[in-house]
Image (tube, helix red, strand yellow):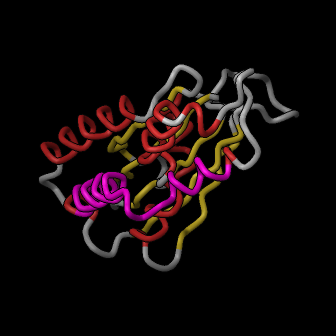
Amino acid sequence: MDNYRDRLIYLKGFLDSISYLNTFDNDGKTYAVGMIEKVNADFQDTLLAHFNKKNWLVTTTLITGNWREVLRKDLRPYFDQIIAEVFTKTNRTTLFDERGHYKQGAKELIEKVRLDNSFYVDHLLQQKFLDCLEQIVGSEPQLYRVEIDWQPSDKAFEGYYEGYCNDFLFDMGNQVLFLHFGGSD
């Protein structure tokens, strides 16, 4: 799709907002989306050039099946952390003992609330994100999972990437649309 620039700008702003909502003092989130020109018609070369790295190991795996469902499942924690945080902060006496330690079953209760489908805000945010993304990549794009090993043992260290992440790319012909959802706990 050639007319993607305005949609990409909107999507970047949208993800910045979601990142802000889902970042807390003990867990910083990083979200990025960008269109990158392919280098040597190769995903690995493209991402190494994008990050200006030579020694990172980059692997990509084609995802088969419904791309929206894959992203919905894998990226959900990046959209709904706010639910767990609000629940935790507003239910201190239910979740914590007098010393500030979690009561038995509290962590499971927080996770149950976070994953409860009756909290529609996370589903609404994800749906909006996927709809915006589809306007750029089309309804049947080729989606790849990206794995980045930023500290291979046999190579010189070139810098930190993330504590944890979910990275994907869409093959757009001469370009790739790169998605990064990550953070450090």
Q: Main secondary structure of the magenta part?
A: helix
Foreground residue among 129 and 47: 129
Query: 40 above or below 131?
Result: above
Q: Residue at x 36, y 50 (%)?
A: 177
Q: Residue at x 55, y 48 (%)?
A: 166
Count of numbered marks:
0
Which quarter of the rendering shows the N terminus? Answer: bottom left
The verdict on residue 97 being magenta is no
Q: Which x, y percent locates residue 60?
A: 60, 57
Q: Residue at x 53, y 48 (%)?
A: 167
Query: 8 above or below 127?
Result: above
Q: Is residue 5 left or right of residue 15?
A: left
Foreground residue among 103 and 63: 103
Query: Residue 103 falls in which quadrant of the image?
Result: top right
Q: Is residue 36 left or right of residue 135?
A: right
What is the magenta range? 108-134
